Amino acid sequence: QVQLVESGGGLVQAGGSLRLSCAASGRTFSRYAMGWFRQAPGKERAFVAAISWSGGSKYYADSVKGRFTISRDNAKKTVYLQMNSLKPEDTAAYYCAGYYSDYDVVRPQYKSEATYDYWGQGTQVTVSS
């Protein structure tokens, strides 16, 4: 089992950058595929990015492609979301999530919340115009 704790959220002006971190507990983090989701006020939680064990496979929502980068450091049991060129519409609570995988690939259903077994409590990102 793994516990996830996000950090790094805050208030930033449009065009600015933030880096979110998600620290994991548990000995098998390196066998977990990880993802980031976000939930804006009044909206459903939506997929942002996903990454395989080794970081060799990465996937992004179209809305963040080219601006956000997901990465991981298995030695530190941490996954990151570097967010650049932030827009007011990026304002949301950001959640990291993970699931154990026997293979170093991301499941085809990586955009679905139901794919992920473990979730953090979220960190708020607010982008002012």
Image: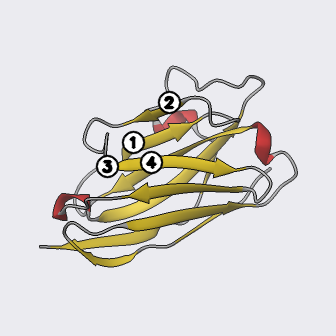
Residues under labels 3 and 4: Cα distance? 7 Å
Residues under labels 1 and 4: Cα distance? 14 Å
Q: Residue at x 24, y 53 (%)?
A: 43
Residues under labels 2 and 1: Cα distance? 8 Å
Q: Are marks 1 and 3 in contact (CB under 8 Å)?
A: no
Q: Which amino acid type corresponds to the residue marked 4 in the rendered image? A: Thr
Residue tagged by mark 4?
A: 69
Mark 3: secondary structure? loop
Mark 4: secondary structure? strand
Q: Which amino acid type corresponds to the residue marked 3 in the rendered image? A: Arg
Mark 1: secondary structure? strand
Q: Are marks 2 and 4 in contact (CB under 8 Å)?
A: no
Q: Which amino acid type corresponds to the residue marked 1 in the rendered image? A: Phe
Quadrant containing the C terminus in the rendered view: bottom left
Is residue 1 visible to the viewer in this orientation of the structure?
Answer: yes
Neighbours of disc 3 within 10 Å: few (<14), some (14-19), many (20+): few
Place of residue 66 in the rendered image (x, y in percent of width and height, measured from the top left) = 31, 42
Give the colour scheme of this rendering.
secondary structure
Residue tagged by mark 3?
A: 67
Place of residue 11 in the rendered image (x, y in percent of width and height, measured from the top left) = 31, 79
Neighbours of disc 4 within 10 Å: few (<14), some (14-19), many (20+): some
Mark with earlier residue (2, 4): 4
Quarter-wise, where is residue 30 in the image? Answer: top right
Residue tagged by mark 1?
A: 47
Q: Is residue 98 above or below residue 111?
A: below
Residue tagged by mark 2?
A: 110
Q: Residue at x 78, y 37 (%)?
A: 31
Q: Is residue 121 above or below residue 79?
A: below
